[in-house]
Image: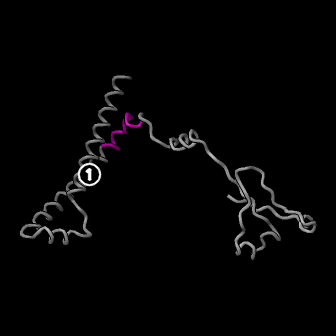
């Protein structure tokens, strides 16, 4: 990070260096030619601002937005959950029909022809597997969250 304070012309007339290093972390940087052309050291100067973090501060910042274990136990609203299930099952229906068509197209072709024909196309088998996994995990978490809510409250 760099700050750009305005230079006082009286200090320049006296030949004093207007910049100073205020800590052992930052130090003066060599000015670029473009900055010099635009008035660096005549109308303003560059002051380096730097900071350090220790290991514990870095660890705290990485854990700041991490989900906690409690997130998996919260039950979703029933209408939202059933709509999500319907959407996933509808997508699974389209993926299964696409997979069926792919199997029919692959009959009588060599492995290389199948590989070349599938380049750039959606892999319905992979999407179908991902949808099944997502549907099962959402339903299991919903069931566990509902059971815990019933037992606790």
Image side of residue 44 versus residue 71, left or right: right
Spot occupied by residue 131 in the image (x, y as percentages of width and height):
26, 51
Residue depicted at 75% across the width and 59% down the height: 47
Residue occupying the far bottom of the picture: 37
Residues 81 and 105: in front is 105
Q: Is residue 104 magenta?
A: no
Residue depicted at 60% across the width and 42% down the height: 54
* Magenta segment boundaries in residue numbering: 70-81
Residues 140 and 109: in front is 109
As helix, strand or loop, the secondary structure at mark 1 comes to: helix
Residue 57 higher or lower than 42, as above or below: above
Image side of residue 70 versus residue 39, left or right: left
Spot occupied by residue 89 in the image (x, y as percentages of width and height):
23, 50
Residue occupying the far left of the picture: 108
Residue depicted at 72% across the width and 68% down the height: 31
Residues 109 and 151: in front is 109
Residue 153 higher or lower than 65, as above or below: above
In the picture of the structure, the residue carrying the numbered disc 1 is: 130
Q: Is residue 75 magenta?
A: yes
Which SS does the magenta portion mostly show? helix
Q: How many marks?
A: 1
Spot occupied by residue 17 in the image (x, y as percentages of width and height):
85, 63
Image side of residue 86 versus residue 51, left or right: left
Spot occupied by residue 59 in the image (x, y as percentages of width and height):
53, 41
Residue 3, picture quadrant? bottom right
- Quadrant holding the C terminus: top left
- Quadrant holding the N terminus: bottom right
């Amino acid at each position: 990070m760099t700050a750009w304070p305005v230079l006082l012309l009286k200090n320049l007339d006296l030949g004093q260096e207007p910049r100073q290093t205020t800590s052992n972390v930052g130090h003066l940087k060599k000015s670029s030619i473009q900055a010099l052309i635009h008035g660096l050291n005549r109308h303003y100067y560059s002051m380096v601002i730097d900071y350090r973090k220790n290991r514990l501060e870095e660890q705290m910042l990485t854990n700041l937005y991490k989900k906690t274990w409690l997130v998996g136990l919260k039950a979703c609203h029933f209408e939202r959950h059933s709509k999500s299930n319907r959407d996933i099952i509808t997508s699974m229906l389209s993926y299964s029909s696409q997979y069926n068509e792919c199997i029919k197209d692959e009959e009588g072709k060599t492995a290389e022809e199948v590989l070349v024909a599938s380049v750039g196309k959606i892999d319905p088998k992979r999407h179908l597997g991902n949808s099944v996994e997502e549907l099962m995990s959402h339903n299991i978490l919903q069931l566990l969250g509902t059971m815990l809510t019933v037992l606790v409250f």
